[in-house]
Image (spheres, rainbow, N blue to C red):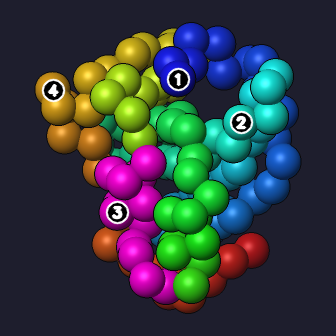
Amino acid sequence: MILFDTTLLTRSKTIIDNSDAQLFLYTDETNNLILSAALSTPGGHVFFKADDTQLGLFYTNKIDLQTLFESTAHMLVTIVEDAECKLYMCNDVDIRLNGGEKLFSEFENI
């Protein structure tokens, strides 16, 4: 699934929102789960389809945030930076999430 228009997403839940990272859960018009995470590289926020199994592994501290992204993101992801949407091929750019090395329990959730 490729996201072109992130304005069509409905924000469902704030998972992490603090000085270390941001992770938000959205749904699209067909109720697919979409995650949005703040990026350290290249900057902005990345939007990618979520997988219930991998999200569960993240919630139970079996994988870190970066692994969650890498295991669920498709070949193309949408990155929004300065109100501009761009499509990136995951293989062509080094995409690093803020706090990506942390497990869920290591974030101080607000």
| Snapshot quadrant of residue 9 | top right
67 within the magenta span: yes
Vertical comparison of 69 with 45: above or below: below
Q: Nearer the viewer, residue 106 or 27?
A: 27
C-alpha span from label 1 to label 2: 10 Å
103 sits left or right of 66 in the view: right
| Crowding near the residue tagged with mark 2, few <14, some 14–19, many ≥20 C-alpha atoms within 10 Å | few
Q: Would you name the residue on which mark 2 appears?
A: 32
Q: Are marks 3 and 2 in contact (CB under 8 Å)?
A: no
C-alpha span from label 4 to label 1: 18 Å
Q: Compare marks 1 and 2 and give the one earlier in the sequence.
A: 1
Res 19 visible? no
Q: Who's the residue at 43% across and 83% down the image?
A: 62
Q: Would you name the residue on which mark 4 appears?
A: 92
| Crowding near the residue tagged with mark 3, few <14, some 14–19, many ≥20 C-alpha atoms within 10 Å | some
x then y, percent, for residue 108:
62, 83
Q: Secondary structure at mark 1?
A: loop
Q: Who's the residue at 52% across and 73% down the image?
A: 58
Q: Nearer the viewer, residue 87 or 108?
A: 87
92 sits left or right of 6 in the view: left
Q: Compare marks 4 and 2 and give the one earlier in the sequence.
A: 2
Residue type at mark 4: give it: Asp
Give the magenta part as a residue range: 61-72
| Labelled disc at residue 67 | 3
Q: Would you name the residue on which mark 1 appears?
A: 1
C-alpha span from label 3 to label 2: 20 Å
Q: Nearer the viewer, mark 3 or mark 2?
A: 2
Residue type at mark 1: give it: Met
